[in-house]
Image: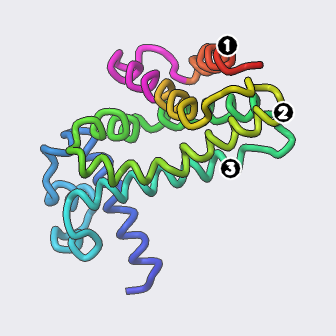
Amino acid sequence: MTSAKKQDKYNSILEGALQVFSEHGYHRSQVSRIAREAGVADGTIYLYFKRKEDILISLFREQLGKLVDKFHASLDDNMNAKESLRKVCEIHYKELESNVPLAFVTQIELRQSDLELRKEIGTAFKPYIKLIEGILEKGIREQVFRADLDVKLVRLMLFGAMDEVVTSWLISGQKYSLSAQVNGTVDFFMRGIGN
C-alpha cells in the first residue's frame, strides 16, 4: 500500500472516530463502530492503532496540530501582541464553532477520560500553550502587557478561559454565536493583563 493510501486510511479512521466519539462518547464507542464510520474493516484499525486510547490521543494531536498551524499562518510579525491574542481567540472560537463534533470531543470527552489518558493528551496541547506564552512575552516586550505578569500562570488562565467559553456554548446547545464572543473575551483579558 502506498504511503498516500496509508495516510488516507489513517485520516479516515480519525474522522470516523471524531464522529463516533462526538455522538456516543469515548467510553461508549466501540472500535467496530469507528471502523464502520471510517469505511474500513475492524482489523484495519489495529494496523494503525494498538488501542482505542491511541485513536483519541492521535485525534487530539492531529486536530490541535492543524489549529496551531492555522495560528502560525495567521499571525503576522507586524501584529502587536494584542492583535495576535485576538487572532488566536478568533481562530479558536471559529474553528470549534464550525466543527461541533471536534468541540464536543475536545471539551467534553477530555474531561471524562482517566488521568493517564488526560496526561498523554495534555502533551498535544503543549504547542498551543507555548504559542500563547510567546504572545504574552512579546506583549511584555512591547509594553502592551504588564511587566509583572506571571507568564506561565497567565497562559493557562487564557487557555482555560477560552476553553470554558466553548464548553458553555456547547452546554447551551449552541444557541448563540461562539465567534461573537471574541471581543468580550479579549476585552476581559486586556483589563487584566494590559499595561
- Nearest to the observer: residue 170 or residue 16: 170
In which quadrant of the rendered view does residue 104 lie?
top left
Pointer 1 local density, CA inside 10 Å: few below 14, some 14–19, many at least 20: few
Q: Residue furthest right?
A: 78
- Image coords of residue 55 (percent x, y): 29, 59
Q: Amino acid at mark 1?
A: Arg
> Which residue is the site of mark 1?
191
User: In this picture, which residue range is highlighted in magenta?
Assistant: 163-178
Residue position marked by numbered label 2 in the rendering: 142
- Reading the chain from its start, which is encountered first: label 2 or label 1? 2
Judge left or right: residue 111 versus residue 181: left
Task: Give the image location of residue 73, x and y in percent.
Answer: 70, 50
Number of numbered tags placed on the structure image: 3
User: Residue 191 or 63: which is nearer the viewer?
Assistant: 191
Residue located at (23% from left, 57% from top): 53
Dot 3 falls on a residue whose secondary structure is helix
**Mark sitting earlier along the chain (1/3):** 3
Residue designated by label 3: 72
